Image (cartoon, rainbow, N blue to C red):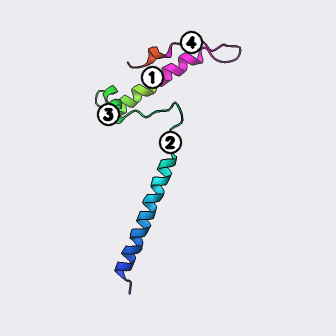
Amino acid sequence: MVDVYYVARVMGYQIRYLLLLVALILSLLVLADGEFVVPARIVSELGNGSTEAGARQLYKMMDRIQNARRKTTGKDAIAANTNAHQYLPA
């Protein structure tokens, strides 16, 4: 016969161990220098209340900046100031 209390105690230890492991892994995942997180509330504001629409707006902004920069880089091209700030939403 299985001792229910023993199983519950062992499962409790396993769950605590798993939670500790997850916390350790998450603490190791940090943003690189220059990277940042935009809060979901702000993203939804960009999308008029929709986080999906706000994310699309941010991706479009990133594409515009990369496209403007791409024109000034490449073989025998000197990277010029593209005034990328003009593509920011604000």
Q: Please name the amino acid that badge 3 sits on.
A: Arg
Residue ID at (50%, 23%): 63
Q: Residue 23, percent across and down?
A: 45, 53
Query: Where does the C terminus fall, quadrant-wise?
Result: top left
Q: Earlier in the sequence, mark 2 or mark 3?
A: 2
Provide the secondary structure element on which disc 4 rests.
Answer: loop
- Mark found first going from the N terminus, 4 or 3: 3
Q: CA distance from mark 2 to mark 3?
A: 21 Å
The quarter of the rendered structure image containing the N terminus is bottom left
Total label count? 4
Discs 1/4, front? 4
Say which label, 2 or 4, has the lower sequence index: 2
Q: What SS does tag 2 mark? A: loop
- State the extent of the magenta-drawn residues as a range: 60-84
Residue topped by disc 3: 41
Q: Disc number at residue 50? A: none
Residue bearing the label numbered 4: 81
Residue 20 drawn in magenta: no
Q: Point out the residue furthest to the right here.
A: 76
Residue at 49% from the left image edge and 19% from the top image edge: 64
Residue receiving disc 2: 30
Of callouts 1 and 3, the N-terminal one: 3
Q: Nearer the viewer, mark 2 or mark 3?
A: 2
On screen, 42 above or below 67?
below
